[in-house]
Image (cartoon, rainbow, N blue to C red):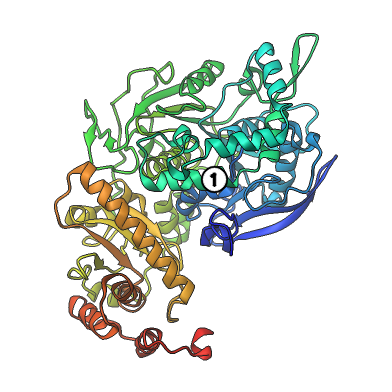
Amino acid sequence: MASPYDPVATDPPLLERSSEIKTYTTSKFTYPGLRVFYRRHQQADRLPKSPAPIPLLVFIHGLGGSVAQFHPLLTSLTSVASCLAIDLPGCGRSEFSVRSWEAYTTDALVELLETIIEDYREKEDGQGVVLIGHSMGASLAALLASPRLPPQTSLNKHVVGLIAICPSSGLPSQKQITIFRALLWIPEFIFNFWRAWDRRGGSGSTSVNRFVGADADSEAKRLQDLYNNQSNTSVWRRMAWGCLPTYVNGVAQGGMPSKETWEKLNVPVFLVGGENDKVTPPREVAKVCDFLEDVKTISDTISPGTSVLADSAAPVDIVAAGSKIDAMTSLGQGHEDTRGCADQEPAHKTRVAEPEEGADDPVTPTEQAASLPSLSLHPEKVVRSIIMGKPATHALLYTPSTVRILAGLISDFMVVHITGRLALGWQLQYLSQDGKWDVKNLRKWQAVEPVSEPIGGIFRAIKTLREVDEDHSPSEFVKKWGGVIKDVIDISHDNPVYNPQGLEKGGIHYHKFPTVSKVPPTDAEIKGFIEVVDKIRAEQKERAKRENWGEEYYVGVHCHYGFNRTGFFLVCYLVERCGYTPEAAIEHFAKSRPKGIKHAHFKDRLYVRYSGLKSEAIEEL
């Protein structure tokens, strides 16, 4: 039986489906068995490649971390760009087969990352790279983006942006480094004993509370406990040792980057910290700002659940709205130029872009090309810093209450300061035909009722949203249904034909659970869907108490029209969690969503599934 902490068994489906185990060789070491996640943008070949393709987003985890920690961000950002993430040696699903301590120095890891990134970057087309690093990963990203001697590759010339989440500003004193090195000489069995003691109590342990806080929600604690137990002590010690510089005549050499590295950066930089971060305190963000004080710096402090609206003088509560609507939301427009860092008072003056007239009119290829947002190979250097308020901690990357805000902030920063081509809304419009957003069988879709009656007191079946539709766009959906539908699960296989941030900014949480049309869901997909809904319902209960919801709130689910796959999953949930018989669940769905499940083979599969019988032929579907 697999361990509950096994990184393979607990790997999210999105990561598992798009990962390879590969071997890479650098100038000094060969690293076998590395897990590399790469998901190419589904529409990469249809989007413009002049002067270069949309940038590659590269995710770099921190000390003791893994690719899995980026899963919530990847769920959002794979829809706008090709994404690459690497489990460093001995981390996550990557093998710990190279034992040399020198293979885990900062310089060795940076060279390994360069090698892997260059393997996936579309070099022939001049593709740029946006580096997104967490904690130690932010330091590695800074080294990758900064000119270094001697350079291993020319990658730094193609870095077009850097996003540092919970960054460290640099090196401790020489005396502190001497103490750290002495501590790392402690025998490994003592380290393991201490770690086991620290992890006593599982999700309620001191180890977990150190990262997410004692008052964190249950899901954040569960994830932190999982990641703590997946961290290999031998690997942690080697990487921690490799982060420390050596001193020659009082001059630090190697190790983590400090002022000399940060100040050489010549790309847009976004720094994000958490007010409750006890691992890399938010003052670290301010220090990095000081290193970059010679450039335009915009700083702010925000709290989950608040947003600054146009010309507003104070934060406005929008019920855990996901991402902040601020100066970054206006594509190509100016912004307030403020100085200072994270301790500065927020600048509330904001410009919000107005929709263009005739946005749904036919667009000719010539007009379409002329309206391309710029894709500069060398974006203007600018620094943006944000300190996310309580309960943001070092785990803000995967804590449910903060990651949605983080995803929106990162997306907004990239759209404004790197390229507007990273906006999902722009991409959908560029790919549209005859000025219409790409919704197949548009007339049929328009004739379908947008939202069903309540189903089992838990769900509302909906049809997919359409970005510019007058009645069923994200903005209209929020106005009409945001008071009762608090989460939306998109089970369609392809990227949505609407921008999920429109839901997130309105307080509705978006979840992607891709499945194939026309084919009844597999047992694994059914199990996964039920687990997703269980988690959402648990989170909704906590949110309802925290945000004083009414008694009526639902989970919206959609495929394309909201009948067959949607109905199949909802019936399964009603049977397995709510005590319905298959017949009663199918009938209840049809009554709440008239016409119900239309495909006979979907209904047949449901009856067989819950009859207690097994058919090999059906299991192979």
Res. 133 visible in picture = no
Horizontal and vertical percent position of residue 136 = 60, 32
Query: Which residue corresponds to mark 1?
Result: 227
Q: Residue at x 57, y 64 (%)?
A: 17
Which is more toward the observer, 35 or 48?
A: 35
Left or right of 597? Residue 613 is right
Amino acid on which the number 1 mark rests in the picture: Tyr
Residue 296 in view of the camera? yes
Q: Nearer the viewer, residue 502 or 488?
A: 488
Compared with 148, 339 (above or below) is above
Q: Is residue 135 above or below residue 502?
A: above
x, y percent for residue 318: 23, 41
Task: Please name the residue shown 54% across and 84% down the image.
Answer: 620
Q: Nearer the viewer, residue 98 or 406?
A: 98
Whole-percent x, y for residue 416 in the image: 44, 38
User: Residue 246's image quarter?
Assistant: top right
What quarter of the picture does the N terminus occupy?
Answer: bottom right
Q: How many marks?
A: 1
Judge from the rendering whether residue 338 lies leftward or rightward of residue 111; answer left or right. Answer: left
SS of the residue at dot 1?
Answer: helix
Residue 584 coordinates in the image, percent (x, y): 23, 82
- Pick out the residue farthest to the right: 28
Q: Against 42, is 249 above or below?
A: above
Query: Which quadrant of the figure has residue 249?
Result: top right
Tell me the residue at 30%/33% (across/down): 351
Dot 1, crowdedness within 10 Å: few (<14), some or many (≥20)?
many
Which residue is nearer to you in this view: 45 or 120? 120
